[in-house]
Image (cartoon, helix red, strand yellow):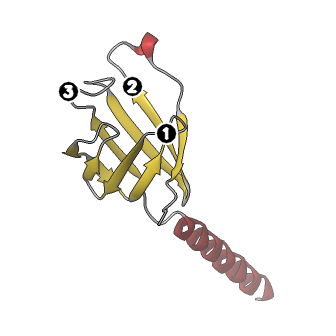
């Protein structure tokens, strides 16, 4: 009987830790800055691309992707971002020619200045 209570406590502790960990990266929404100094804004499926175009992408709380619009660098490629934590996302741009793909980049939340 005592073992059952210990197992129950361990299960509760695991659920609590999982809940706290997932809450740490609440959602991908916000303004993100690249290492090169460009930025993009995500508000649900509404995105302002690094080239300044307002578009609709595919969105869930921790991921967004869209086809890069005409007139922007890498037009026609798939832009994909996954949230790592509250302050970082991993971005990869997948072109139609896989040999031209660049490594993923880590973007950070842009700092708000007044």
Say which of marks 3 and 2 sits in front: 3
Q: Residues within 10 Å of mark 2 (few under 14, many from 20)?
A: many
- Compared across the picture, whether 89 is left or right of 20 comes to left
Mark found first going from the N terminus, 3 or 1: 1
Q: In this rendering, would 54 be left or right of 3?
A: left
Distance from Cα at disc 3 to Cα at disc 2: 15 Å
Q: Position of residue 85 (x, y in %)?
A: 56, 57
Check residue 70 in the rendering and tell me which mark sits there, or answer none: 3
Residue at 33% x, 23% y: name it: 74
Figure check: 96 above or below 41: above
Q: Mark 3 or 2 closer to N-term?
A: 3
Residue 99 vs residue 49, the one in the foreground: 49
SS at circle 2:
strand
Q: Which residue is mark 1?
A: 37
- Left or right, residue 16 beside residue 60: right
Question: Can you say whether 63 is above or below 7 in the image?
Answer: above
């Amino acid at each position: 009987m005592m073992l059952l209570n210990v197992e129950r406590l361990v299960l509760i502790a695991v659920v609590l830790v999982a809940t706290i960990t997932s809450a740490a990266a609440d959602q991908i929404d916000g303004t993100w800055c690249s290492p090169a100094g460009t930025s993009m804004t995500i508000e649900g499926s509404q995105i302002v691309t690094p080239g300044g175009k307002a578009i609709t992408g595919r969105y869930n709380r921790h991921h967004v992707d869209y086809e890069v619009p005409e007139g922007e660098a890498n037009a026609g490629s798939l832009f994909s971002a996954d949230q790592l934590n509250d302050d970082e996302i991993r971005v990869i741009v997948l072109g139609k020619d896989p040999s031209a793909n660049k490594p993923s980049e880590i973007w950070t939340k842009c700092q708000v200045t007044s």
